[in-house]
Image: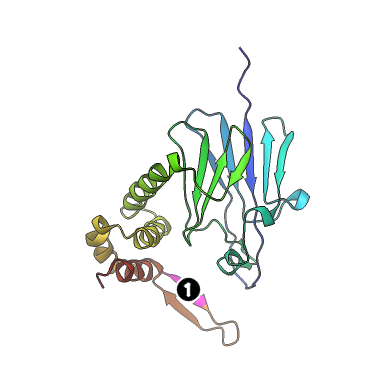
């Protein structure tokens, strides 16, 4: 029996827009439940100018997918580049399909990227048999993130619950209106720092989308 091929999927995106930061976005690595596949989400441009690179465990590049195969002009308005990196995957929800043949990324503006791990292809439209699973999993994960100890994950859950109009999230979202997590926004002309309560903002926006605020 042949040993399974170990794949490393590196996703790198580019952007229009700029800014400055005093920190860097962290790479994110996800492995499949069967340990067959590792997905590496990166905030930085990597070699070959490819949006997605499929690799075996020994570094052999199986497939390269260019950015214009993944993003439309409208998508380019949704993510930004700064000295911290490219924030394309920030606040995204990702998971493997039940049969482990797909890796799904739900980006923070609602776009779905489905990677077929058998055919080594990226799909920007979901197959009919996968639609319900993607919707249900997105809802479940979003709801669970609202109660995470990580404030960035609570923010992610709030964003997704609002877009998906998850009514079961209303009580948790109202509770997050008092969330005390914040980060500083800096005006680089005046050097003035202002607290940004990003979880509260996300919860408030979600409640408006659901029609409860």
Start-end of magenta stretch: 181-185
Residue 74 among those drawn in magenta? no
Dividing the picture into quadrants, the one containing residue 81 is: bottom right
Q: Which one is nearer the viewer's eye here, 190 or 174?
A: 174
Residue at 61 percent of width and 66 percent of height: 76
Compared with residue 110, is residue 28 higher up or lower down, i.e. above or below? Answer: above
Q: Position of residue 110 (x, y in %)?
A: 46, 59
Residue at 56 percent of width and 51 percent of height: 124
Q: Which residue is mark 1?
A: 184
Q: Position of residue 172 (x, y in %)?
A: 25, 59
Compared with residue 8, is residue 67 higher up or lower down, i.e. above or below? Answer: below
Q: Is residue 125 left or right of residue 86?
A: left
Residue at 70 percent of width and 55 percent of height: 45
Residues packed near mark 1 inside 10 Å, few (<14), some (14 to 19) or many (20 plus): few
Q: Position of residue 200 (x, y in %)?
A: 34, 69
Dividing the picture into quadrants, the one containing residue 167 is: bottom left
Residue 184 among those drawn in magenta? yes
Q: Where does the N terminus fall, quadrant-wise?
A: top right
Compared with residue 16, is residue 192 higher up or lower down, i.e. above or below? Answer: below
Dividing the picture into quadrants, the one containing residue 181 is: bottom left
Q: Is residue 8 left or right of residue 102?
A: right
Q: Is residue 201 left or right of residue 66?
A: left
Q: Where does the C terminus fall, quadrant-wise?
A: bottom left
- Badge 1 marks a residue whose secondary structure is strand
Q: Return the residue found at the far top.
A: 1
Q: Return the residue found at the far bottom.
A: 190
Compared with residue 136, is residue 160 higher up or lower down, i.e. above or below? Answer: below
Residue at 66 percent of width and 70 percent of height: 16
Q: Is residue 79 left or right of residue 98?
A: right
Q: Count up the numbered dots.
A: 1
Q: Return the residue found at the far right.
A: 48
């Amino acid at each position: 029996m042949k040993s399974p091929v170990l794949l490393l999927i590196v996703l790198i995106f580019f952007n229009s827009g700029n800014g400055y930061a005093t920190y860097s976005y962290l790479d994110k690595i996800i492995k499949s439940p069967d340990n067959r596949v590792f997905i590496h989400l990166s905030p930085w441009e990597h070699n070959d100018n490819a949006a997605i690179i499929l690799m075996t465990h020994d570094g052999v590049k199986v497939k390269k997918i260019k950015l214009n195969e993944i993003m439309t002009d409208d998508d380019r308005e949704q993510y930004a580049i700064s000295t911290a990196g490219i924030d394309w995957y920030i606040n995204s929800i990702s998971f493997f399909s039940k049969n482990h043949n797909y890796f799904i990324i739900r980006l923070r503006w609602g776009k779905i990227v489905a990677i077929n791990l058998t055919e080594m292809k990226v799909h920007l439209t979901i197959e009919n048999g996968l639609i319900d699973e993607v919707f249900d999993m997105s809802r479940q994960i979003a709801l669970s993130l609202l109660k995470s100890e990580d404030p960035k994950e609570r923010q992610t859950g709030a964003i997704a619950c609002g877009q998906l109009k998850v009514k079961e999230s209303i009580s948790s979202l109202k509770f997050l209106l008092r969330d005390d997590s914040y980060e500083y926004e800096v005006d680089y002309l005046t050097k003035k720092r202002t607290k940004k309560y990003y979880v509260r903002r996300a919860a408030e926006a979600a409640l408006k989308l659901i029609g409860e605020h």
